Amino acid sequence: MIAKVSGLRKSCGAVVAAGLVMGMMPSAVSAQADDRMERIESQLRALQRAVFPGGDERFFEPEIQPSTNPVEVRQAGTPSTSALTDMLTRLDAIEQQLARLTAATEVNENALSLLEMRVNAVEEEQTAAAAAAAAAVEVADTGEQPVGVIAVPDEDGELAAIGTDPSLDVEIEGPSDERLAAVQAIAKPASGDQGDDEYVYGFRLWDGGFYPEAQQQLSLFVEQYPDHWRTTYGRNLLGRAYLDAGEPRRAATHFFENYQADKEAARAADSLLYLAESMIALGDTRRACIALAEFGDTYPALATGRLQEQYDANRGRVDCE
């Protein structure tokens, strides 16, 4: 569909130029120019139907319409509209139709690209989760541990921790005593609004640089309080907790979800801008440019206000044509 509209742009550009030249020719060729114009308009309508099956009236008018104005009877001796004026009017109509087709195509292309980003992120998360689940089932069924790690049973014989297999230079450790103490030192507020308290606690963990703990806490908050006024803040901060931890692909999922959930929400614009930043981190310039263009079009006030510095910094990191 996009290829058809792209071809239509080039064709109509040439038509407009040719039409102006034909309109200024002597009257002897006016009839021939008029026939060619009718043929071009017919071809344009055919292309419109190919791009928009079903005759969507948002983009072009039906060929037969009821008359809305009384028929104007021209008195004898009144001169008719000149061939040039008539041709220019029809060329204007063609240009307007082309503009509507072009705008609709660009909107669809941006929407499809954002959707593709979302699908790819979700599929990768599902693949990773399925692999982890399969590994866990295998361990439970066989009692064997993945290569490179060994189980450390506790006093009751349960697997309490994962240690290091000395024969393999792979190490997976739990949090140190110092880290546990540092996390426990972060107080959870008790304001009376339990949802707000859960979010603020997640924010404090993130602010302290405890990104895995913040991810867990903010995920819990978003799941338990999907309609809280802080939810848009929670989704955005959850994405930042992954981005700051060096996981831009997982971060992009949460940024996209927050933007799509409510584009008028308090942190929707922030998430769209951070989505572009995640794509930059992944080296995906095309999607980064799409997100930045969407941000500039949707939030022009923020692009020159609160988020201008971040917006300009991200645009300076990519070459968007």
Image (tube, grey):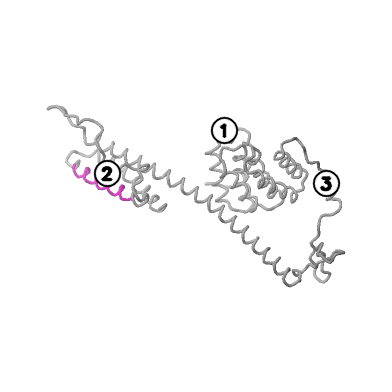
Q: Which residues are magenta?
A: 31-47
Disc 1 element: helix
Q: Which residue lies at the image location 39% right of the left edge and 50% below the top edge?
A: 5
Residue density around tag 2, few if under 14, some if 14–19, many if 20 or more, within 10 Å: few
Q: Which residue lies at the image location 69% right of the left edge and 45% below the top edge?
A: 221
Write down the residue under mark 3. 184
Q: Amino acid at mark 1?
A: Ala
Q: Is residue 264 left or right of residue 7?
A: right
Q: Marks 1 and 2: in contact by CB < 8 Å?
A: no
Quick check: can you spot residue 120? yes
Q: Is residue 100 left or right of residue 256?
A: left
Residue density around tag 1, few if under 14, some if 14–19, many if 20 or more, within 10 Å: few
Residue 226 in the image, given as x and y percentages of width and height = 63, 44
Residue 274 in the image, given as x and y percentages of width and height = 63, 45
Instruction: Please tell me whether residue 120 is drawn above or below residue 217 in the rendered image.
Output: below
Q: Amino acid at mark 3?
A: Gln
Q: Give whichever of 19, 124 is nearer the camera.
A: 124
Q: Which residue lies at the image location 26% right of the left edge and 33% below the top edge?
A: 68
Write down the residue under mark 1. 301
Write down the residue under mark 2. 63
